[in-house]
Amino acid sequence: MEKLFLLMVMFATCCAAPRDMSGKVFTFPRESKIDLVKLLTHKQSFNALTTCLRYQTDLSRNHVLMSLATPTKFNAFVLFKPELDNTMRMHALDGVADFKSLAIAPNTWHSMCATWSSATGLAQLWLDGKATIKKFIKTGALTGQPISVLGQEQDTYGGGYDINQSFIGMITEVHMWDTVIPSTEIKRYMAEQYVTPGNVFNWRALEFEITGQVLVEDMRDVK
Ligand SMILES: *[C@@H]1O[C@H](CO)[C@@H](O)[C@H](O)[C@H]1NC(C)=O
């Protein structure tokens, strides 16, 4: 029984066939506490992170874009839009920083990248080609099998989803690297040019599992 469970866990966490998601988009069409996409990776230890994604939503309430939890840190790395105008919130290792005075127009496609370094604890957000100031969140390595989710905020490790923080809208071109990638690369991402794909999550070879009603659609059908 234990062996079976282990096998099931392995299947759940490691072996979804990678899919080339070029030209595709995840559509989150409703308010829900079950709809989500889990992104899968073998990596368990991070000294730095960069993640980039593009999204569109018409939400003004609290909502999450991506949440990464470890067994000991439920807000290990999170991109969260609080109800505060023009503010984006980033969590790292359960610490937090708000990036303010951003131009986040509703119902508009945005390109967003977030970086965090465990050595300096510094985080930076990029929105539509512009970098914010850097802010200190927390130092220290991020370790432990991560559960990475698009569309739901995790209040526990892989659970505790809150309908009132769920994402409604579209997300595409998600990448994550285990380094702070050069700003030249981030600018290329923002300009929709070729970037070296993420080595944690790679949109062009994405391992993921959908729960609930999230649709994979062609970008040309939504934009
Ligand atoms: C979500 O928000 C609605 C409206 O504000 C509220 O009635 C409901 O209790 C909230 N649900 C949860 C689970 O917090």
Image: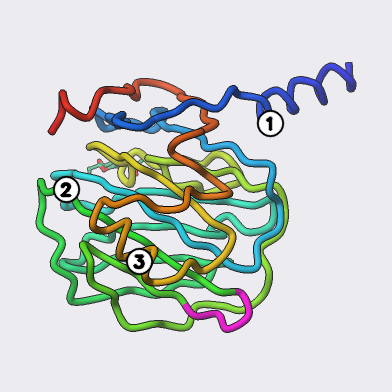
- Report whether the residue tagged 2 is closer than 8 Å to ligand 1: no
- Name the main secondary structure of what is drawn in magenta: loop
- Ligand 1 quarter of the rendering: top left
Q: Quadrant of residue 169?
A: top left
- Label 3 sits on what residue type? Arg
**SS at badge 3:** strand
Reading the image, the residue beneath label 1 is: 14
**Which stretch appears magenta?**
118-122
Crowding at label 3, few (<14), some or many (≥20) Cα neighbours within 10 Å? some
Quadrant including the C terminus = top left
Count of numbered badges drawn on the protein: 3
Crowding at label 1, few (<14), some or many (≥20) Cα neighbours within 10 Å? few
What residue sits 10% from the left and 46% below the top? 107
Separation of residues labelled 1 and 2 (CA atoms): 31 Å
Visible in this render: residue 64? no
Of marks 1 and 2, which one's residue comes earlier in the chain? 1
Q: Measured from the top left, where is residue 210 in percent x and y?
A: 46, 24
Reading the image, the residue beneath label 3 is: 89
**SS at badge 2:** loop
Quadrant including the N terminus = top right
Visible in this render: residue 192? yes
Q: Measured from the top left, where is residue 157 in percent x and y?
A: 61, 45
What residue sits 58% from the left and 55% below the top? 74
